[in-house]
């Protein structure tokens, strides 16, 4: 289970894009570094993050080694009615994590 | 680790050890690969990035693409390319009308001073491109202690 944080506004207006902030706690090892003993540290990265609203995918990202450790993402979503926003992520070992929040559309 | 390996690992920026000094990857080739040959227009993308980054490990990157984001006219994808990184494809964002705004922010690793290229795919088969140069004083590095 890969830990992470999700922030959405407390209330949003129907049809108006609102900001979603995601922080995923992950080393994003690029595979080029060595440990103190000179051994290669294997590549280990979160390679996909997807956001669904009301069960419907609205945004996703394919990440490479060029994304910093503890990936931070800010993007926008537009909603017509209240619903659950869920962000899920998976790394190259298949380990997953997710966070969700209820969005109140006024 | 042999002493000379250690010294080499200290001296060289990341990715170069096995390959000698890298020449940058060619963004034009990368663009052609993704667009299938159509030429992107140099308009409509705003890249917000520091001109000088002291630490290449986490450089803030904010991309905005001018688009109404309607079902008929929206940004489908935003691709980010860093020509001097050992793996130049940094990330691809997939958007649609439900995003409401073609506006994404993240933090990226840069292996050295270089141009960061952003390519946007619009619905309707149009492509946009923009690039920004970033001077990186300490590149994202190989060894422990650099993060």
Image (spheres, rainbow, N blue to C red):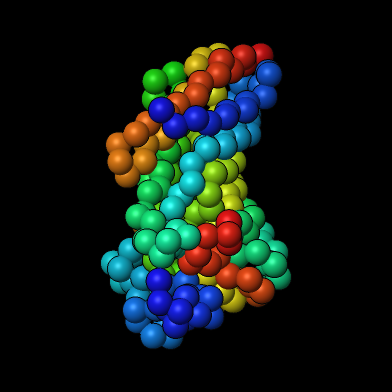
Can you say which quadrant of the picture contains the C terminus of chain B?
bottom right
Say whether residue B129 is visible. Answer: no
Is residue A78 shown above or below B48? above
Work out which quarter of the rendered image holds the N terminus of chain B and state it. Answer: bottom left
Q: Which residue is drawn at 48% across and 41% down?
A: A26
The relative height of residue B91 versus residue B130 in the rendered view (above or below) is: above
Residue visible at 53% across and 76% down? B10
**Residue at (40, 77) in percent of width and height:** B2
Q: Nearer the viewer, residue A57 or B57?
A: B57
Q: In which quarter of the image is residue A50?
A: top left
- Can residue B34 be seen from the camera position used here? yes
Q: In this view, does A75 lie above or below A32?
A: above
Task: Determine which quarter of the picture holds residue A49.
Answer: top left
Side of B140 where B18 appears, left or right: left
Residue B73 at x, y = what percent?
Answer: 46, 46
Residue at 57% over, 49% down: B106
Q: What is the total number of numbered labels drawn onto the structure image?
A: 0
Residue A38 placement (x, y as % from top left): 41, 65
- Judging depth in this view, the residue of A22 and B36 nearest the camera is A22
Residue A102 screen position, x and y as percent:
56, 15
Q: In the image, is B57 to the left or to the right of B16?
A: right
Q: Nearer the viewer, residue A33 or B117?
A: A33
Q: Which of B78 and B10 is in front in this view?
A: B10
């Amino acid at each position: 289970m890969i830990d992470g944080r999700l922030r959405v506004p407390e209330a949003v207006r129907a049809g108006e894009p609102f900001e979603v902030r995601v922080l995923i706690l992950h080393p994003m090892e690029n595979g080029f570094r060595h440990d103190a003993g000179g051994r290669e540290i294997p590549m280990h990265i979160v390679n996909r993050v997807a956001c669904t609203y009301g069960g419907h995918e609205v945004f996703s990202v394919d990440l490479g080694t060029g994304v910093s450790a503890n990936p931070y993402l800010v993007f926008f979503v537009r909603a017509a009615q209240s619903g659950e926003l869920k962000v899920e992520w998976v790394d190259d070992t298949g380990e997953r994590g997710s966070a969700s929040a209820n969005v109140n559309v006024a | 680790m042999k002493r000379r390996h250690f010294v080499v690992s200290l001296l060289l920026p990341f990715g170069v050890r096995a390959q000698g000094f890298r020449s940058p990857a060619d963004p034009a080739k990368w663009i052609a690969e993704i667009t299938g040959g159509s030429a992107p227009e140099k308009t409509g993308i705003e890249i917000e990035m520091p001109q000088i980054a002291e630490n290449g490990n986490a450089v803030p990157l904010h991309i905005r693409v001018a688009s109404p984001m309607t079902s008929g006219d929206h940004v489908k994808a935003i691709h980010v390319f860093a020509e001097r990184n050992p793996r130049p494809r940094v990330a691809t964002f997939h958007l649609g009308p439900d995003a409401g705004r073609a506006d994404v922010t993240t933090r990226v690793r840069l292996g050295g001073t270089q141009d960061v290229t952003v390519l946007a795919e619009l619905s309707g088969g149009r492509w946009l491109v923009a690039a920004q140069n970033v001077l990186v004083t300490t590149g994202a590095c190989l060894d422990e202690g650099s993060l």
